[in-house]
Amino acid sequence: MNFDFSDDQKQLRDQARKFLAEKCSPKAVRVVLDGKAPYDKELWKGLAGMGFLGVAIPEEFGGAGAGHLELCVIAEEMGRANAPVPFSSTVYLAAEALLIAGSDAQKKKWLPAIASGEAIGTLALFEGKGNPSPKTIKLTATNGVLNGVKKPVADGAIADFAVVAARTGSSGRESDVSLFLVDLKAGGVEVKSLTNLDPTRGQAEITFKDCKAEPLGAAGEGWSILTQVLDRAAVLCAFEQVGGSDRALEMGRDYALDRIAFGRQIGSFQAVKHMLADMYVSATLARSNSYYGAWALSTNAAELPEAAAAARISATQAFQHCAKNNIQVHGGMGFTWEFDCHMYYRRANAMALGLGSLSYWEDRLIDRMRKKNAA
Amino acid sequence: MNFDDTPQEAEFRATARAWISANAPKKYEEELRKSSLGRTALKNADILKVAKAWQKKKADAGWACLHWPREYGGRGSSPIERVIWSQEEGPFGQLSRMFIIGHGMCGPTMMAFAREEHKRSYLPPLASGEKVWCQLFSEPAGGSDVAGLRTRAEKEGDDWVINGQKIWTSGAHYSDYGILLTRTDPTVPKHKGLTMFFLDMKSSGVEVRPIKQASGASDFNEVYFTNVRIPDHQRLGEVGDGWNVSLTTLMNERSAIGAAVSTGFPELFEYCSSLMLDDGPAIEDRAVRSKLANWAVKASGLKYTSMRAISALSKGERPGPENSIGKLVAGSMIQDVATYALDLQSASGVISGEDAELAGRFQAMLLRAPGTRVEGGTDEIMRNIIAERVLGLPGDIRVDKDVPFNKIPTKGRG
Ligand SMILES: Cc1cc2nc3c(=O)[nH]c(=O)nc-3n(C[C@H](O)[C@H](O)[C@H](O)COP(=O)(O)OP(=O)(O)OC[C@H]3O[C@@H](n4cnc5c(N)ncnc54)[C@H](O)[C@@H]3O)c2cc1C
Ligand SMILES: Cc1cc2nc3c(=O)[nH]c(=O)nc-3n(C[C@H](O)[C@H](O)[C@H](O)COP(=O)(O)OP(=O)(O)OC[C@H]3O[C@@H](n4cnc5c(N)ncnc54)[C@H](O)[C@@H]3O)c2cc1C
């Protein structure tokens, strides 16, 4: 057994960390936070230049052809830096959907554009409240023409294309759902930006009005593809959450060392020490669950569905826990706009919802464990 | 033991109800009902103006600061009458929020320590909301450790000259007066060198700078003092006795009864009662019910704890440190409740503001909640108070207690 990343992968992590420390300082993140730009274009270009956007995209489609373990280490760094770019939408959702279900032509068209930073992609799945389920898909596709509304769509206002889940049948079964690819710049869509918990990442409502779309994957296979995409994205997002947890923990630890109250470092009070120790425990459990998810993802193991749900739950809890108690360790300072604590609190709570609620993933985990047990 | 009104209480309730029904600003009722932690503004009106108008109306009819003596602008009511009033006032009680610090903390401190002529001139306009007060205690170097504050007061003739900085002062930007804790002697141990004053916030040399909060709003401020002169007759308590004076304020802070801290539970229960989940009404979902039940008993536990405290108060007992439990429980609970409400909305829970579910009520609550766990004493300080003052456990080893203030270390690492 060797349940660890390789030296090359660790080197890649160091490289990504160094790059992001330079190009994605909290000050840079704040440009987007304060609404002065919809995302950090310079950083996006830089990430393409480093080969990070296409790290898991095969060479024949313009990527680096490394793999998902490499993508995991980069994801962790993206989370740690709270990067204000559409990385998860483009790389974990759109690119993964293309890799799983795209035709050769579709892959040739979009994957090189993703790797080079020219195309931003996203997944248009949700239609208001409710967890991912075939029932909630109301947007219709008739003869390749889409009508309906998707909301929220992560990075929807800056995306060039979207993978759209549409209803193509009315049998009440999963096979009613098919996926489509939509060039968002080609007309037939209306995009409205929505205010959201984490202004460093956009959310939008997209209305499709007689919008032309091409099928992605076979008709009626949409739900099964989506399930795979969500599982894969769950692992990758978990790494972002682990990176965010670690950063929040570090910020809290550093502040506890520097801040004096009652003539002592506040880190010398057990209440603070134990708060930080508990954050460390959450972050460590999340990291280990995520490593297992990474293994399952990179080997396409049968365990992936269960491992993905476990990583998702564990990392969601850890990031929320670390982000909120990082504020607590900072006292009044933690509750200011000026300190960075709230950026992680916002990101943690937004990420907790992005792929469907925590309760939804809890349900999935137990379902999958039961299935495995029965088998 | 019973919860029924006595005949006098019933009569009081009927009178209060009739007066509120005839006089309350009804056009804001719906909006006030929908407001909650993190979202108290009115859409088409300045809430401060509406609040002041309501407070003035109450004062004119003898319904302001019910438990205060009449000569200071109150009604001389019993603690239980005060509870009855707040039950009857309902959503309009939201309008008292901007007066909590003045009525709950500054007023009682003035009553205990100010000269009689000052009480008679300053307290009635405080009660009526014509003048708003703030609490100038915390500083960059002293929040939990408020006795570690550095703002200097030096005697010059009959005046004191103030230099220094306060921080996190809620409402300083709309306040007329403040109570100010200062250091008058840095050469003695820190608790011994403090002195309390009250001052006019429009005094020359006072500068208020709003601070943007994590939630995006700006409810608190930095306040700078540059050679601000305060006459000695505005001193509260003896020179060097400021710590004891401030304890009066802080004890009152904890027992600002009636203005019970919000838990978010009523809002969540109402939400779940009408929410449809993927497979049926939320209120029929086992997992949702389990969460609700757990929060329900915390909320009711707090409610009845505060009723017990009020009963004790009405028998003349002083509010004690056990009142710390309210904010400790409610602070983290409202954060958890808001998080769960968003979870029930799934991905769309990320949307905030007007486009969001219930116009973003729970999103605003989530973003404001971290402040509740810090303001008025952090969770950790509340636990220390319960452990030390209620349970009698020994305090932490204090490295700063008997050391002259100017010899206490101020830096962490390096
Ligand atoms: C099932 C079991 C098996 C054990 N096996 C072994 C063994 O094989 N070999 C061996 O040498 N010992 C063994 N121990 C003993 C064990 O290490 C001690 O019981 C333990 O270290 C606690 O010490 P104590 O009993 O003196 O309790 P105390 O140290 O008196 O602790 C009492 C309480 O105070 C708390 N406390 C104490 N100090 C601090 C502090 N600095 N900060 C915060 N809280 C504190 C503790 O957490 C505890 O809640 C065993 C104990 C148990 C229960
Ligand atoms: C929304 C809001 C409104 C406020 N309004 C006012 C106001 O109107 N007037 C006013 O004077 N102040 C106000 N405050 C300030 C508030 O009282 C302080 O922020 C609070 O007491 C914490 O102090 P601090 O910010 O200096 O944090 P610190 O005291 O530096 O605390 C940092 C961390 O260390 C922990 N800690 C510190 N000491 C100990 C200890 N002995 N044992 C264990 N843990 C410890 C804390 O719990 C916290 O986790 C407000 C604060 C907020 C957030």
Image: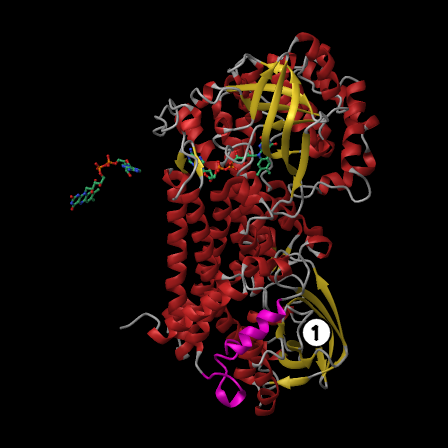
Residue B394, horizontal then vertical, whole percent: 34, 26
Q: Where is residue A342 in the image (x, y as percent from the top left)?
A: 56, 51
- How many tags in the picture? 1
Tell me where residue A107 appears, x and y as whole percent: 57, 87
Q: Is residue A301 left or right of residue B292?
A: left
Crowdedness near tag 1: few (<14), some (14–19) or many (≥20) residues, C-alpha within 10 Å: many
Write down the quadrant of residue A109 in the picture. bottom right
Which residue, as the protein is rendered here, is positioned at the far top? B116
Residue position for label 1: A139
Residue at image position (69%, 31%) is B98
Which sits in the foreground, B156 or B196?
B156
Q: In which quarter of the image is residue A285?
A: bottom left
Residue A371 shows up from this direction: no
Task: Provide the residue span drawn in magenta.
Answer: A40-65
- Which image quadrant is residue A221 in? bottom right
The picture quadrant for ligand 1 comes to top left
**SS state under label 1:** loop
* Percent coordinates x, y for residue B241 in the rendering: 51, 15
